[in-house]
Image (tube, grey):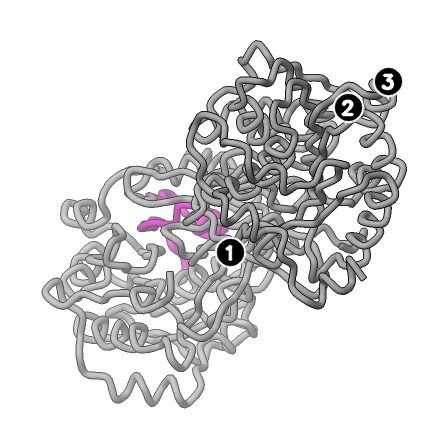
Amino acid sequence: MSIWFTEELHPYYRKGIRVKQILADEQTQFQHMQLVETEFFGKAMILDGIIQLTERDNMGYHEMIVHVPMLAVGQPQRVLIVGGGDGGSLQQVLRYPSVMEAVVCELDQRVVELSRQYFSASFGDPWADSRTKLLARDAFDYLEANPGQFDVIISDTTDPIGMAERLFSDEFYKLMVRALVKGGAAATQCEQPFFDTELIKEIYKSAITLTKNPAYYYANIPTYPGGGIGFMYVSDTPWEHGLKTPYPPGMNNYINPEIHKAAFALPEFFRRELYE
Amino acid sequence: MSELVKPPLYWVADYLTPDDVLYHAIHRVILHKHTQFQELWIVDCGTYGKGLILDGIWQSSTGDDYLYHEALVQPACVNQGNPKRALVLGGGEGATIRELLKWKEIERVAMVDLDAEVVEACRQHFPEMHQGAFDDPRVELVIQDAVAYLDSSPSEWDVIISDLTDPIESGPSFKLFTKEYFAKAQKALRPGGYFLLQAGPVSPPSMHMHVRLVSTLKAVFAHVHSYHIHVPMLGHPWGFILASDSPIDIRPDPAEVDQLLVAKTNAKFKMFDGITLLGLMQSPKHIRDAIAKETAVYTLEHPPVFSTQELPK
């Protein structure tokens, strides 16, 4: 006998992870949260039935969503993370000595609390850093109230179902770009080329209307649908600027110069859909 | 995702053979712990209510436990006729003692289970199974190894029900499926007493253990009879073996059985009555043939090893 968590984000595709132990299972004010010890991937966090991260493969996601815009900007000082309650993106942001303030807009404080309890081995305790400012509020209002404030914005959100759906809208991208300083850069969690082509095209349309040099890039994450996830880089500053910037102190586990460059190479069917 | 059907949190894959899987949904984990002897899960499994899993083997669910437990207990009791003293080996859920307490003149029911933590968990989480049986003054719960208990038990039981977990090698109970142990059970019976063994699946690829257990009991008792019932959540048709030095009525008269049940029990059965017993006692040809051919017996030197050893983990 074995116990399996089965994710059914799509009606035509499912993915299973073998579970050793169930650590937490609760309905928060906003979503259903499961924390499990898996057979291979270490601990995993599941929100509303969708795997958000595992200890074993989250580094690809967090390093790519954070370092690509951070390195492109060069010396980011003020950073905003939308979502990101697990602390993985925050940990990467705080590696930069130039960062003076990292604001995290996370609506669901239980995600922060349980992640602090269960993921400290992976993420340390970035919440204790004096540069961290945790806000339990809606990112829309916050962006609206803070134009021209951030060197980098990381939109580290759940999938566009329910409460996160608005974070994939043209309206959101307008507010996000408006909240950047001139030359600032944003990166957003931007789904999967095979499953979400139309959504990504819509988002790219917003990004190219709002900024000069947006681009889509991709990272391999075995526990996400299709084995990976993409990001939208949104900026007037070309992402290639980041290739010349030295990495911040601390160890990389996913990104290196080759990966950084290769992540922007897209399969032909998808490159054509997106860029032609 | 459909708005109407809530998808399960997890699936338990119960391998019936290396090629066949029965998936049970887990909507909620009620309890998960490693006891001193085994790993225990109590889960909300949805349609069939709550389920108990020990050492990775699905034991029972509240939605169909009456099929298993009535078939486990009542044929032995009816053949004995009016049990006063009954011994249960294993039976952590408390549903086995519940069935025995349906007999009005029962004076004493001893339940011997090795694992106090399993019993306590079932007592707390399966009230629909034990129905308060643990609190009945006629019931004595003994936390002890069943072999040790039988070693020191005088010949005082009208009925002995062996409701032990399957004899997996790493589990606590594989010794209790051997000729030596059955001889102890035989000694512990009063004249006219009946021994009943939970005896594993009887599906075509999985019936070899059951068949050999029949052969083993035949080496000890004068009368041995195999029967089985379909318990949906177990996946396989499930086998039992009734053994005694007194005769076993395999063509009981339904009306006589019903009269006995009215006279001697509280008659609160969901599945069991005279017609059910008559049907239960009849086995199909392929099982009878397999039993007729088997000659080997399980001994302490060659105990059974339940076939999950060969199944994917």
Say whether residue A69 is left or right of residue B280.
Answer: right
Q: Are marks 2 and 3 in contact (CB under 8 Å)?
A: no
Q: Chain of mark 3?
A: A
Type of residue at label 2?
Val
Describe the element under mark 3 as helix, strand or loop: helix
Q: Are marks 1 and 2 in contact (CB under 8 Å)?
A: no
Q: Residue furthest left?
A: B301
Where does label 2 land, which residue?
A181
Q: Residue B218 falls in which quadrant of the image? A: bottom left
Using the numbered discs, state the Cα–Cα distance from disc 1 to disc 3 in whole angstroms.
49 Å
Q: Is residue B166 magenta-colored? A: no
Where does label 1 land, which residue?
B12
- B173 over B295 or under it: above or below: above
Mark sitting earlier along the chain (2/3): 3
Classed neighbour count for the residue bearing mark 2: other residues with Cα under 10 Å, few (<14), some (14–19), many (≥20): some
Q: Residue B15 placed where, x, y %?
A: 44, 66
Dot label at residue A145: 3
Q: Residue B211 falls in which quadrant of the image? A: bottom left
Using the numbered discs, state the Cα–Cα distance from disc 2 to disc 3 in whole angstroms.
14 Å
Say whether residue A33 is left or right of residue A205.
Answer: left
